[in-house]
Amino acid sequence: MRWSKAPSTQYPVPSSHRKAGYWLLATGYWVLLAGVTLLSAAPSAAPSADEKHISVYAPVASYTLPVLDRAGREYVGLLELLEPLGRVSSESNGRWLKLRYNAIDAEFVAGKTRARIRGHDFDFATPFLIENSRGMVPLSSLSALLPRFLGTPVNFRESARRLFIGDVGIQTSFRLDAGNSPRLQLNFSAAVNPTISTEPGQLRMVFKRDPVVSPGSQSISFDNKVITHASYSENNGDAELDVAASEPLMASFSNDRKTIIVSAVQQTPAPPSAVATGSQNPAQVRPAANIASSNNNDVHRILVAVDPAHGGDERGAALTDTLAEKNVTLGFARLLRHELENRGFAVALLRDADTSLTLDQRAAAANVARAGIYISLHAVSQGSGARVYTALLPVEGASNGVFHAWNAAQAPALPVSRIVSAAIVAEMQKREFPVRASSASLRPLNNVLMPAVAVELAPGDDGVADLISANYQQRAASAIADAVVSVRDRLGVQP
Ligand SMILES: [Zn+2]
């Protein structure tokens, strides 16, 4: 758990200057978003629940293959890699592998770093492997290995696991039409088919099969109050473009899917050309349609900010020799998101990857998103069941005339926070889940403007294994979600 205590220094903010305070929080929020996208682009040594992939983009095909970890190195199947690109035949006895790609012969030996390709030696930095007659090559060798077969250079962006063969990169350019209802036009040099999703403050486009390349800089700022900036990142075979805004956004396609128009939800969704394209292929236009409708609902939905504690370099408690708290809290947060969404809430995970966030960034993200409720998640290896915390505010920090201490931002919401805590306790007891309520001087609960609780998950009858048991987490998550439903009338959106 390792709570960080509230610092003793107080920063009183006169209520007439609250806007300035919000501005600072907003700055923290955008930093946070940039941090999430940029940090997730960095290769991570930490175990991840998500499968690793490599994406290959070639003039003849774009495809994604699983990446396997062997002895701390990343490998991909050699035949799977070559088959979409040409004619491949192979023969193996489990110890060696003979392969023909088009007219090129090659021979590899299991556990060896030297191979023969087209009559020449080829040296790997990491041994070639054969598993079940399947040859596997280290990703670190691909930039040197593939040109031997293909006869053309390749561009392998290894940290993002994206491999470009030939001149296939899709260029992106931006054009912002300012005005009362600003529109951001993203023009691509070829048709694209991203997965599009929205969350408070941003619209996210993930390109799995499209060889979209960086638009030059990782982050582009717009001189606009509504659509503020866009950022590019790439990770695990995907490229991602995020557009940040102060209002809910939607996206629509036009120009045969070479243009995506991003606009605030209130305005006309799409030019007629986009609708016409979509009607020819309803499956492809579905993302844009979904966003429009879900955002219209979101306007009246309560937003739950779910905060998986710790992350990145900050691992939290060591629950076992190999299990870090930061991974348990993330898995638990994703389950809770699912339970809450099933009950009609909008949910923002403050991190959805193994990224570092400061406590101030977490509070700022919840405050700026104007969440109706904030739920922080922790895990411990001691004790049993769960403990639910509400903030214990510093005495001198309580509301004090026109001054309002940052460390007591929670004060006005605290009575409702206690109601939420009691509701979670009641729902857990219904499920015979041992549970206790406490208050503690802990951050960032103190700094959050809306009703806020922290839930610390402890093992059940099966010990620490419960902490990663989907069944155990599920019981806790559905109890929390039912509790939020029971108090939903008390959770106003912040003014
Ligand atoms: Zn913790």
Image: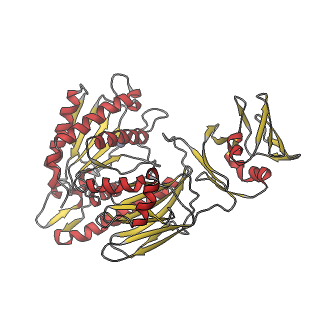
- Picture quarter containing residue 115? top right
- Picture quarter containing residue 371? bottom left
Q: What residue is shown at x 22% (from left), y 37% (from top)?
A: 482
Asked whether, in this view, residue 86 is left or right of residue 431, the answer is: right
- Residue 246: x %, y % from top left: 31, 66
Q: What residue is shown at x 37% (from left), y 42% (from top)?
A: 334
- Picture quarter containing residue 432? top left
Q: Nearer the viewer, residue 299 or 23?
A: 299
Give the quadrant of the N terminus. Answer: top left
Is residue 479 depicted above or below 151 in this figure? above
Q: What is the tally of numbered marks visible in this picture?
A: 0
Is residue 89 depicted above or below 54 in this figure? above
- Residue 82: x %, y % from top left: 71, 45
Q: Is residue 36 visible?
A: no
- Extreme top residue here? 461
Ligand 1 occupies quarter: top left
